[in-house]
Image: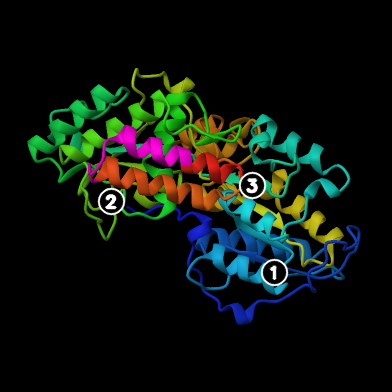
Amino acid sequence: MKRTVPAALLVLSLGLTAACSDGGSDAEADSSAKGPITIWLSNNKEELAWGTAMVEAWNSQHADQKITAQEIPAGKSSEEVIGAAITAGNAPCLIFNTAPAAVPQFQKQGGLVALDDFEGAKGYIEQRTGSAAEQYKSPDGKYYQMPWKANPVMIVYNKAIMQKAGVDPENPPLGTYAEFLDTSRKIKSSGAAQAAIYPSPTSQFFQSWFDFYPLFIAETGGKQLVEDGKAQLNSAEGQRVAEFWKSLYAEGLAPKEQYNGDSFGEGKAAMAIVGPWAVAVYGDKIKWGLKPVPTSAGKPAAETKTFSDAKNAAMYSSCQKRGTAWEVLKFATSQEQDGALLKATGQMPLRTDLTATYPDFFTQKPAYRDFADQAGRTAEVPNVPNSITIWQTFRDAYSESVIFGKRPVADAFGDAAQKVDGLAGQR
């Protein structure tokens, strides 16, 4: 299915040789220095349009501190491109699409500037984002990323397929695992769709953010995969989530083969796990509805948490004009610019009272309201050492036991938990 690709895995449009440097790496750079800076933006069309307009607005008022913006250079992944730029000392001042999962590695490389170094930064971040800001702190208690925007994931369903399967199209029973499985069986047995739901069964580490992890967050009331240095995946809740997905795969309700296309958009699957990007993609093409992700007992929507799928902004240590970079970071995350981002992309700024702050937008585009409401109940990936390796370790165990059924879940998850504990304890 189509979705906003995680920032750590974006494949973007410019070569690394085109990257502009703001000076060599210097951890002792003056935090008040002003002057021209370079920033990198995602190549997402709507987001790039927002970034271009933001830069024009800033440059029109700061002739001596102009921003040069470009898309993140092309490479196998933006994570690798950014890591290479850190090593070479030619990263830009700011990157607006820094994946939270990659922050621990970038920090370990010495590539990030602690935003706490700037006067009032901690207060600005926490006032803007509220209590959710806490989960973006690094283990040393500092912020190396600005919480910026989220794509909280929910279940989207095709009303026409539900009706064809003999299921209430306006309120299909999907709240509990038992209900979800029963509805899925009706879809499959009726021939209404090839699959009930079709998450990617591939092995990339980030795929767990769009099958297991949202349901784990919902089932646990907001726990992360690692908490207090210990893996949580082999808990009773983690086992329940895994067994639910295993049932979907074992019964053929979720296929084990990769689908090269948009399974939901093309009517191959009745449901999908999506973020607010789905509103613009599916629009009036499909009669669709939204539900929170299921839990074993069926929590009310107002109590169900999910994965945030956030993309953040960060300042990189090669930046020599950090005073300007900090002012640009505040400008780009101001209430005005957050509103422009929301309008241009439909992505949810990570700020408190979202619907009350932008009432006109949600009145004019009510399809986004459920996502905005869900944005207030999310959890992020854990900010721990070896984050990417931890997620890959988990994905390998999940693939082996849940998708392909080669090992009992308890055995695979137990072994993975031991490995994760060791990785999370490394510095």
Q: Which sits in the foreground, 306 or 238?
A: 238
- The residue positioned 73% from the left and 60% from the top of the image is 110
- Give the residue drawn at x 80%, y 55%: 326
Would you identify the image quadrant in which residue 21 lies?
bottom right
Residue 406 painted magenta: yes
Q: Which residue is mark 3?
A: 148
Q: Mark 2 sits on what residue? A: 265
Is label 3 in a helix, a strand or a loop?
strand
The mark that comes first in sequence, 2 or 3, is 3
Q: Which amino acid lies under the numbered mark 3 shown in the image of this protein?
A: Trp
Q: Residue 410: x, y in percent?
A: 33, 32
Vertical relation: 232 (above or below) 340: above
Residue 193 in the image: x percent, y percent?
15, 43
- The disc at residue 171 is none
Which three-letter amino acid code belongs to the residue tagged 1?
A: Ala
Rate crowding at label 3 as few (under 14), some (14 to 19) or many (20 or more) other CA atoms within 10 Å: many
